[in-house]
Image: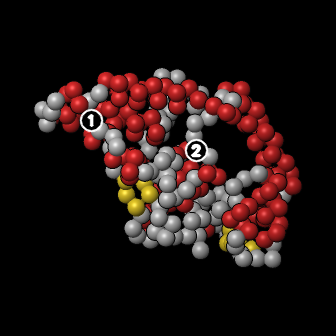
Amino acid sequence: MSQFCFICNKLLTEDETVVVSRGMPTLIDASVARSDEFADYLRSQKSVTIHVDCRKSYTRKTSISASKRQREEEQASTSKVSPPHTRARISESSFCFKNHCLFCGDEADEEAEKKKVKIYRRKIHKVSTLTFKDSILKLAKDRSDDVSKAVFARINFQYDLVAADAKYHDSCYKSFLRPNTGGKIGRPQNLKYSVRFGYILNGTERALKKKEDFSMISVSLIINEIQTLNRFLLVSGQSY
């Protein structure tokens, strides 16, 4: 059983809870009406434990209507900035633990990494312990930023990450472990942007320290990386 309320993402111990079993159809109907990501999860459960107040708010018709209006406004606002066919991010519906990094959502393919110049290869790990999920959920709750919320949504209802063959980039994991300072001046930092740009800087630094032939760092490769960053930032509504 999850230690968190799926509605508010907070620990169940923080407020009064209720075990919902006969009322599952009502929760499912509310999820469908809200067009959120919980309907499939709820259909797979015989019962769920949630906060009493969260249940009332989640199933209240006025709250559902308000949620739908907010979603429609957000979609209308997003469509003006970035047309649907130009979005680069992997949708959560197509996310697969076997193929994607559970932190950034990008492809995590060992064979593809082997084809890259060595200094640009991303180290990939598989989740090997059951305690990994609980520690990441706790970190996500403590960070409480956009990245942590996305990670929380991905792994919270996956009972066994080991059995799911979940993967992650070593660099993404280390970035996630860093304390979230919050409130920074300027553009919010993007995990994918930071990691990818870090490959260029770190790779160059390693080559210099080892006194390797600098020609191994292809100019065209660096240009390609920068162009990829620019495209991602443009479709994300950010500037570079």
- Please provide percent x and percent y for residue 220: 35, 24
- Judge left or right: residue 170 versus residue 94: left
| Residue 232: % across, % down | 52, 31
Count of labels in the image: 2
The structure residue drawn at horizontal position 59% and vertical position 29%, both measured from the top left corner, is 235
Question: Furthest residue to the left?
Answer: 211
Q: Earlier in the sequence, mark 2 or mark 1?
A: 2
Work out how far the residue at label 2 is from the one at label 1, CA to CA, in angstroms: 26 Å
Nearer the observer, 100 or 141: 100
- Where residue 211 sits, quadrant-wise, is top left
- Identified at 58% across, 44% down, the residue is 90
Q: Is residue 34 above or below residue 198?
A: below
In the depicted view, which residue is nearer to us: 13 or 192? 192
Mark 1, residue position? 203
Query: For this view, does 97 lie left or right of residue 226?
Result: right
Name the image colouring.
Answer: secondary structure
Q: Position of residue 166 (x, y in %)?
A: 47, 61
User: Is residue 122 at all visible to an observer of this figure?
Assistant: no
Q: Secondary structure at mark 2?
A: loop
**In this image, 75 relative to 103: left or right?**
right
Task: Tell me the amino acid under the disc marked 1.
Answer: Gly
Which class describes the residues within 10 Å of circle 1: few (<14), some (14-19), or many (20+)? some
Could you say whether the residue bearing mark 1 is in a helix, strand or loop? helix
Q: Quadrant of the N terminus?
A: bottom right
Q: Residue 116, percent across and down?
A: 33, 40
Q: Which residue shows up at 40% across the image and 46% down it?
A: 112
The local crowd at label 2, few if under 14, some if 14 to 19, many if 20 or more residues have their Cα within 10 Å, is few
The residue depicted at 71 percent of the width and 75 percent of the height is: 47
Task: Look at mark 2 in the image and give the residue it sits on.
Answer: 90
Task: Pick the residue in front: 29 or 119.
Answer: 119
